[in-house]
Structures are given as C-alpha cells and as structure tokens.
Image (cartoon, rainbow, N blue to C red):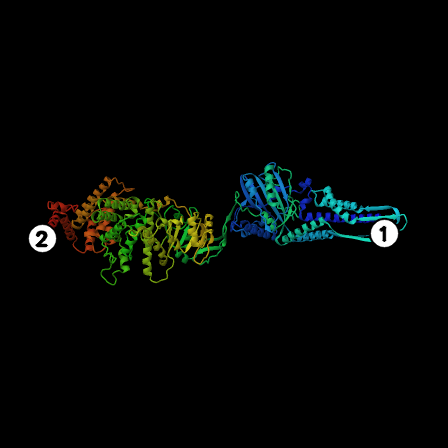
Amino acid sequence: MENNTLVAQQFSMKNEFNNDSAIIGKQTEEFLRLVYPSYLVDRDNIENLLDDESSLQLDGMTYFRISCCTADTVEKAFETVNAKIEKLFTALHSIGIPISYGLVSRKGVTNLVLGIYSSSDVESVKKITQGMLSGIEMESYTPDFSENKISDMSCGILSGVPTLYLREQKQTFSLSSIMRSLNGQDYTVLFIAKPITTQSVTQNISDLISVRDKAFAVSKRNVARSDSYSETTTHTKNVNDGKNSVAGQVGAGIGATAGGAIGTIFLPGIGTSAGALVGGGLGTLLGSVVGGGKTHSEGYSDSVSKAITDGNTISGDIQNGFALELMNYADKAIERLKIGQNSGLWQTAISYSADSDVSRNIIKACLCGELSKPDPDKLPLLSFEPTSSQEEILRIPEFLGRDNENPLCSYMNSSELGLLCTMPTESVPDFELRIEKTYPLSRSYIGSDSVTVGYVADGKKAIQNMPFALSPSDLNKHTFVCGITGSGKTTTVKKILVEAKKPFLVIESAKKEYRNLAIDTTVYTLGKPELNCPQINPFYIMPGVSPQTHIDYLKDLFNASFSFYGPMPYILEKCLHTIYKNKGWDLTLGYHPMLANSQSVANFFNIKYTKRKYALASHKYLFPTMQELKNEIARYIEKELKYDGEVAGNVKTAIKVRLENLCVGAKGFTFNTCEHLDFSELLEKNVVFELEGLADDSDKAFSVGLLVIFINEYRQIAKEISGYKKTELKHLLVIEEAHRLLKNINTDRSTESAGNPKGKAVEHFTNMIAEMRSYGQGVIVSEQIPTKLAPDVIKNSSTKIVQRIVSADDQQIIANTIGISAKDALQLGTLEAGYAFCHKEGMSLPTNVKISETFIDDDGVEKELDVFVSDEGLYNHNSDRFYKINIGTIRSVLGEDDIAKRKIFALLNTLFVESPEDVAVSCNEVLNQLSSLLRQRGISLILCRDTWSIVAEYMTEVLLGMLVQGVYCAKELPADEFFSELKNALSLPTPDKIYKVKGGLAKLYNQDIAKFAKQNVALLAERSLKSSSNISASISGYFIKVSPSTLSEIVSLVKGEPST
C-alpha cells in the first residue's frame, strides 16, 4: 500500500516536471525568435529567406565612398570615431533611414562605402554624416552590382550580436584585417541595417519580460514529504530488514524527459539525447531526495510484541537550471532593447561575398575573429553559406522595402551597429584616418569693404554661410602667406587682390601666374626687353626724398643682394657719394641747384616747386647711372685707394664683376639708364613685375629691393604731404619668394673687428617693410620655405595664411606664430591644396579655411580668378619696345666709346659757336660716324629702317646730359620744348631747325652762347696742351667743323692775347 502511494507521488512529480519543461521549451523558442532568430532557421531552406533580386536592391541604393576621416588623438582614435558613429546611427534611426556600410573591392581598389536606401534621403544623410564626422571625405560612388557580375561568387551571411563591453571594457571592431588580407582582390562586405520602430521595440521588450516571468515561475519548486512506520517486536527466531528506492528511478526518468524536451528546443545543436543525459543527471539527484524509505522488524519465539511508531518528514527546494539560464539571457536582452528603445534598434544583415571559397572563408574568419568574444551573456555567431549564384554578386536576406522580419538578420541597437561600422583606425589600403586637432569655426565680421578670402571649413567641407574675411585694417598690418609649391598660395593672394579692390603691385620672382588675373593689369617683364621690360635708374631720387637717405638705401640694397666683403661696402658708399656730387648734388643739405627754388629762402625746399622741375623731361639727366658708378669705382680703386697691386686688383675685379652684369644686355637695358618709373602713376593701377627673365638670384634680389625702396620713399613723402590725416589702406604690395632679398641670416656682427653688412642690410629692409603700415601701404609676403625668410618678416605680419608645410622646422616656426602647439604642428603637413589655417588679429587659434577660387564682378557675375595671358599677348601690346631696345643697345655700346664721346662733345661746341649751316653739316657728319662705329662693333639694330633717328635720339640724351652738368652746365633745366626741338634737329638736320635750337640755348643760358663756348674750349685746350702741341690742331679737335675766325679767337684766348 505504502509503495503504491509513493509511486503515485512520483508520477505526479514527473508530470509537473514535464509541464515545466514544456513551458521552458516554449519560452526558449520565443526568446530565440525575439533575440536570436537565426537559431530557428532551417539550414536546408535558407534560399527561401534570401532576396531573389539582391543586386537590384543594392543598386537601388546611393553610395558614397569614404576616403578619409579625422580623430583628435592617436591614443583614443577608435573611441573618438566610434562615439561619433554611434551618434550618427542614432540620428539616422530617428528619421527612419535604412543604410548600408562596408567594403566593395573592385579592380584592385578597396572602397569603404556608405549606402542610403532611399534616394530622397541622400542629401539628408550626407549632411548629417558630414556634421557628425569632422574631416570626413565623401565622394559619389557607383558599385554597379548588376553590371559587374562575376560568375560563381562565394557568398556568406553572418548572424549574431556583437559584444560591446566585456568585463566593463569597451570592445573594438575593425575591417582592417579584411582590407589587408584581401587587398587587390574582388570582394564585398556589407552591413545592411533597417530601422525598427519604437513600438516594435516596446512590444519585444514586453514579450521578453513575459518570457522571463514565465521562466521564473518554473525556476524553483518546494517539495515536502512525510513518513511514519511502526516497529513490532516478537520473540521469534526470524529477523527481516528491507529498503526501497523507487522514487530515485522515477526521478531519473523525469529529469531525462525534461532535459530532452528542453534540449530539443533550447539547444538544437545539442539534441534530445544529450539533453536527456543532462536531464538524467539532474533527475538522479532529485530521486535521492523524494524516494527515500526504510523498514525494520524482529520477532521472538515467545510472541512478545511491542508497537513503536516513528515519524520522519523530508522537504527541499528544487531549482530548474534551464529556467535560470533563460531568465539571465532574457534580462540581458531586455537591457539591450531598452538601450535600443532610446538610441534606436536596427534589423541588421551581415552579408559578404568573394570570387573564391578561400577568400570567402578569410572574410568569415576575420569577421568572427573581430566579433566573437568570450561573453557568457551572448550566444555564438551563426554563419550561413547560400549556394553560389551567377546572377548575384552578393546574396542578402529579403527584408529591404518590406515590412517583415527575416530570421537571418540580427537585432542590434545603435551602439552595437556603430561598433560594426566604425571606420578603421589602423593603416589600411585606400583609407586614411588623419589625426587632426579641430579648431574654432569662427565667422568673420563682414563690412562693405571686407575682403572675403574663403569660407570656414569643417574638415574638408566649406561652410558657405561662414566666410573668412580680412578688413582693410587687417591688410594694412601686413599679411604672410606660406606653403609649398602647389598648395595654393598664388590663388590665395590673387583672391585677396581681386576682392580688395585696391591698386596693387606684385613682384613675382618666379613663374608668371599673376599676369593671368581676370582684371586689368599692366605686366612688366624684367630681363625680357622683347616683351615689356621697364627701364629703372636705381640712382633716381624722387621729389622730397633726401639724397643721403637714398644713398643709404642703395648701399644696403647692394649689400643685401650681392656678396660684398672686406672693404667693398665702404668703397661702394664712397663712390655713391662721389657720383652724386659729380652730378651737382649737395649731399649736406640734400638738394640739387636746378631743382631747388634759389630765389626764396622760405620756399627753397618747396615741394610744389620741386615737382614742377621734375615735370621737365630733362631732369632725369641730373642723376647718375650704373655705368657711372662702375667707372667711378674703377677710378677710385686705381687712383685713390692705397692698396697694393694684387689686393687692389682683387677688390676691383670683385666689384666690377658684380656691377658689370647690371650694365650690359637685358639687365643693362633695365638698370643702366637715365629713365625712371613714375610711381605716382604706377601705384594707382594694377601692376605685375615678373622677374623670371633674371636667372641669378642676386639680380632678382636687387630688383625686389629696388622696387621696395622706391615704394617706401614714395609713401613716406605722400604721408608727409597729407599731414596728420588718418592713414588708410591705399595700396597692396605683394612680394613673392621674399627670401631672395630678406634672407634668414645672422644680423649681428661676425667678429669684433669685422661688421656684417649683409645682415645689417637685411635688417634694414625688414624694418622698412614693417614701417610701411603707417603709410597706408599693405604688404603681402608669399613664401614657400619660411625658414629661409628673415624671422622678423613673419613676426611683423598681423595676418597669417598658412597652407601646406611639410618640413618639421618650417612647421615649428609657423605653428609658434599662430597659436598651434609643437605637437599639433604636424597637421600643417596634411592640408590639401586650397585649404589654409588663417590667423589674424584678435584670434587665439587659427581657423581652417577653404580658399575661394572665384570672385563676383561688378555686374554680380561669378568668374574665375584667371584668364590666360600669353607672351604673345604682351608682345603685341607693346609696340615701341624695339625702339627702346635699340636706344639701349646704342647706349651700352657707345657709352664707353671715347671716340663717340669726343664726337658728340665736338658737335656741342660746334652747335654753340658755328653757323646753323655748318652745324647742320656737322650733325650729318656725326650721325654718319656714329652709325659707322655701330657697324664696326657688329651692332645690328632690330626692325629699324631709320638708324639715324635712333642715333639722333642717343645723341640728344648725351647732349642734354652735358647741359646739366660739367663745363656746359646751365643754371636751369632745359624746357621740354627745347628737348623736342633738339631731337627733331638732330634727326633731320636743317639750318632752320638748328637756328631754333641755338635760340633755345641762348634763352637757357641767358648769354652769348658762342662766347661762352669759346671760353670753355679755351680752358679745356689750355689744360690739355703740352709744350710741343699744335694749339690750332688741338683746338680743332674740339669741333666737328670750325671756322678760321673761331679758331683764331680761341687760340688767342689760350695764349692770353687780348681779343681783337
């Protein structure tokens, strides 16, 4: 009876366990459906779950190729990028946009792509992505999945959930292993994600809570059983003992059944038999608790009996391990979904394909290696391998564009999806993660006269409503632009020049790019007279400028440009003073008698009077020339310098070599002249000086410095004239490759006894440029290599525009001036062409700016900065250049010819003394003689049909020079009318023309010019006569044609005889 009761109890317990197992199995299935649906997939029927038009679905997306992104630091690069990606997917989920991310490798190029499912969302996603990820570079990309079909692609699908944290440490993920392993091969890896609505997430959370609660209900049972038995003692001869354990066997059966049921559903990979083994183990333990019993009896022969009743109660708690495990998984899943409820939950497919099984397996291995973590709270990843298809490059689950759930997809929140889609932070093919510090996105104040240089850039994205502009005040305080070749310096400067709407002068040491500016510009080509080469007398002094100041500037110019050493700087200075004195200049008071108002003490230096004198064409002959400096240096060394022969020869040769090249050829045409530039006109228009025709850096430095001197002098005088009027930006001076003049050299004395003339000169020019600010002269210095440039030039520039700099020493110098640390200076080497770090007054840190390459003209039309201007265009623009070239050629050939000098001087004497008829004949004779000299020297004038007119032009220059200095120096400058009459008379000599000239001379000298000339010739002859000389012959040499009466009169003057 008792055994029957115990068996019944055991069968009841078995039914309870069967019910519990069924509940656990059902809830396990529900849990897998909600969290790991791929575990319920029948591998034999996965084709039914794939999209039949995978390629069309993928081609329907719009893709961007991501080639670059930025992070602040190397140490936390992944954390930085991952945090931004998580925010990106949270943002995209909020507006319900399906996306894809991954790798598409075609024809040896690996493309990291971002795909947008709906074409209407493309612009939104692009802007959001660029806003979230600073420095990201996105370009349109078309993978053409339908067109680029490759036969027998090996495909795969991976399903599972990545681990975000393991032992409280954030995990990482990277596609770099795939990119490196399969570099150059054709393959595709895509993470395709479709947003799940918040309502669906909430419902899934509710379902998981129900699963957890139902598992909890069967996770623990309390079992209580009580026994009673009696003991009778009889005096018999028999003793019986018995034991029972039926419940244990039944318990094992119950456990095995439950384990099999759970195992079938919960762990399909394990199966029913293994589950039964596990359940059997658990059932044996249960049986030992619920099936315990004992019976004992004894009898005696005397039939004495004793009834003993004993009661025993057994109770215990039984835990269901499967239910507890299910509860734990459900809790973790609920936690993940709650995160997804806030940040977004995605139905995600991980699909991949390659052109071989080996490559596919490599992708699978790399993905599993990155995603599989020893996380006890996650089920393992499952992989599926669909059959190869000749129609599809990539097989994806069927879920895009449909409101269905595909069990091949996984459910990931935005953090988990962001982990998968974080861009590689290691070095990989075809993608770069740049370590760049982010700088302020500072908007510039825009005034009516502001110069918009470009637009503030966030990474490589220009923000069109945030211009970076420079005010006229900023430009007036000087600007420094630097960057290697091709970084965009010239474009930057051009943009400033066009937008500033101020006249400018560009000194372009190399190339010829500024001539192409799309505004009216006058181009001068130094060293190329055949185009449009200017003629500039370095010794010309503008009205109001002190001669001593100009001499000091010239001394520094020669020292800064050429390598003068030893006594050479002092010899140069001495000879500079001498040639000006020879021209009649008073260096003590700083004036020339022909330019000062000697009739009034109060107005002696009156600038208006001086300017009227400067308006006369003949005033240019009051200034020395390069040839005269060279001759004076040679004379000084030979006649006055007390050096031994060899030393004197070395010094003379050294100086002569340096000056000789400025007196001949194209450089002689430019610098060995009496001509000058009118800077009052020049600084009112747009001008470019190209120095490409000067190959020697010393010559380029000389040209740059000379122009800087003249501009500085002009601005100084203009400032003095304007008085205390507020100085505003009037003009912009651009100096390209300024290191040719302003070299980075030591400015201190080299030794105690020796000076440092070149360093001193560079310092002088640096200070000169710095001081131009106060005159309304803005300066823009453009330089490739900052370390070559004098440091003070950089320091004295208020605005700095820094484009790509690659050398570490250059980076350090520039970084220090714009507020960048030495560590962050490396970022200057990553700038692309057209981008710059801009720093101006009032900024603590620079701003990244995309320089604009267009401008808006006066009609409101957007135009390019450049229009091509060829040499041919310049050639055709200047029609009288060959006339000037021929004059320069004659000047360089005959200027040093003693015969030519004597002939022209003899003509001057003849002009003063003889009759117009004789002078006309003499003019023709001299013209013939000089033309003959040119032929003897092998000189052929270019495109010249009238040699006499050009020779006559040269003769006019020489004669006018004689009228303003020397024995024939007049008290007044010849008028322009006289200048024209003299030139006309010499070109085509006639008595009438000569008569007019003689009248002009009489008016100029205000005396008997014949008597004046005779006295001069007499003095000259007297000085040159020797005791054995023939006086008449000697005097005749001072004339081309001399009458007997004139000869007799001069002889009498020489002999001291009274005139008759």
The residue closer to the viewer here, 4 or 621, is: 4
Label 1 close to label 2 by CB (< 8 Å)? no
Q: Is residue 764 above or below residue 407?
A: below
Across the whole image, how many numbered discs are drawn on residues?
2
Q: Residue furthest right?
A: 302
Q: Is residue 575 left or right of residue 224?
A: left
Q: Position of residue 501 (x, y in %)?
A: 40, 55
Q: Foreground mark, 1 or 2?
A: 1
In front of the other: 499 or 701: 701
Residue 56: percent from left, percent from top: 61, 42
Q: Is residue 396 visible?
A: no
| Residue shown at the point (17%, 48%) measured from the top left | 910
Image disc number at residue 230:
1
First in sequence: mark 1 vs mark 2: 1
Q: Residues within 10 Å of mark 2 (few under 14, many from 20)?
A: few
Tag 1: Cα neighbours inside 10 Å, few (<14), some, or many (≥20)?
Answer: few
Quarter location, residue 768: bottom left
Mark 2: amino acid: Pro
Kindly identify the residue that appears in the image at 85 percent across and 46 percent down: 240
Q: Disc 1 on helix, strand or loop?
A: strand
Q: Amino acid at mark 1?
A: Ser
Mark 2 sits on what residue? 1058
The residue lying toward the viewer, choosing from 82 and 463, is 82
Residue 382 position in % (x across, y down): 65, 43
Dot 2 falls on a residue whose secondary structure is loop
Residue 1027 percent location from the top left of the image: 10, 46
Residue 906 visible in the picture? yes
How far is mark 1 from mark 2, CA to CA?
187 Å
